[in-house]
Image: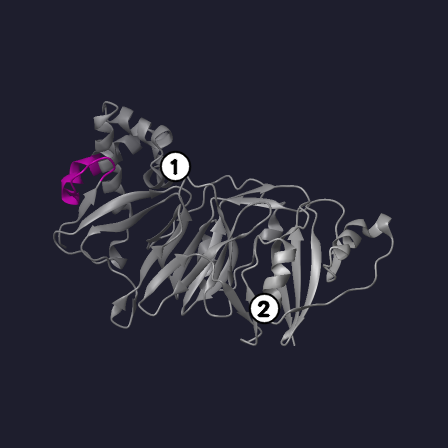
Amino acid sequence: MPDIFLTPFNQPQPVPASTYTGASAAIKGCRRRSPQLSAPRHRCVTRLFPAECLSPYISCLSLKPGEDGNRALEYLAAVSLEDGYLEKSTMKYRSGSAWAVKSLPFLAAMALTPAEGRAAAVSMGDTPITPVSELHGFKFVRLAKLPSAPGDAGDKDTCSNFIVQPATAAGRQVAARGWSVTGEAKVGALQAVSFAGRFEQGTSGTCSISDGNVAIYDNDQLIAIAYVERSASDSIGHVAGLENGSARVWDGDFLSSPLGDIELTDDSQLRLGKMAREESLCAGKAIVPNIYGMSIDKARTALAEKGWSPAPGEPKTDPAQFGREIALIKQEIIETDSCSGTGLGYCGFNYRGPAGSLSVTTAGENDPPKVVGYEANCR
């Protein structure tokens, strides 16, 4: 097998993996002597959290903090190859290729990305599929093996309505690694699976989802992963399929909103980018523009341009029961259906179109409120 080159953290030049033979033996010795290193081995090898994992290794190996910490990282990289966290069987190497070992903060895994040369990839014809992120704070990289989920899932049991039973082989693989699957969707011929490691219960039946990711599979083979950088304010909650064959990624906030779309382009890019300007519904017979985050007065104008007309509901005359609805109707938002008086302040609005009906939901106490979702009922 040709030599493999690894670029450790904070080390400018790639180092041949064959130089880590002694490092592997030293790490094994540390594991034998220190139960704290052998028991959580999969976490320390894959996470590379300095306080939790590097310090015990540095101490065991009698290394000095600072520069020698880089050597400890080299040791961990060598062990990762040996333990199979970097999949030799699913990647092709060539002599002189340089590879960088990087930490995926929310995935708690190690991924390989090429520093130079070509990486092995699933191909569409003769062109390899390349994951690309166009969203700030998001990474989309190749990954061949999914690690186990972190141990503490938080309020997973009370947030069970945000977890789905996997319906695909890819989803079942993710669940078998201890992750909670939050959504499944096709991206062209590929399978997207969203999953998370931790949940936090909120008010009004809401939950916050963290340690969220989207895995992309080709049949039963993992090929790529999308995740959020540690410094970013967003988190990935779930993925949902779109009629055009792409998938929409939603955040993990208590009141979830869309982050962007994943699509497989004609030139074999697996692209995570901004949300499409409009969505095709009802087998292409209806179009809904991107109205997320719009105030309902602006959203209804945008909907009218796509053939959706207001559908007034039953008359509402009792201010004590329908105070907010009456106020919105007085603003000529005649399609106002109902509003909740507590919780997140949801309101519903109804529209008619050539392909069926559309229900739009807003939230919050803004006047007028802003759109957080919609659902079509096709004829």
**Quarter of the image containing the N terminus?**
bottom left
Tell me what residue is drawn at x 28 percent, y 53 percent: 87
How far apart are labels 2 and 1 at the CA level?
57 Å
Q: Which residues are magenta?
A: 8-25
Q: Residues within 10 Å of mark 2 (few under 14, many from 20)?
A: few
Q: Position of residue 279 (x, y in %)?
A: 52, 66
Q: Is residue 85 visible?
A: no
Q: Which residue is mark 2?
A: 305
Image side of residue 97 versus residue 376, left or right: left
Q: Quadrant of residue 34?
A: top left
Asked if 379 appears above or below 131 in the picture, the reply is below
Q: Secondary structure at mark 1?
A: loop
Q: Quadrant of residue 365?
A: top right
The circle drawn on residue 40 is 1
Q: Amino acid at mark 1?
A: Pro
Question: Which of 372 and 179 lies nearest the eye of the viewer?
Answer: 372
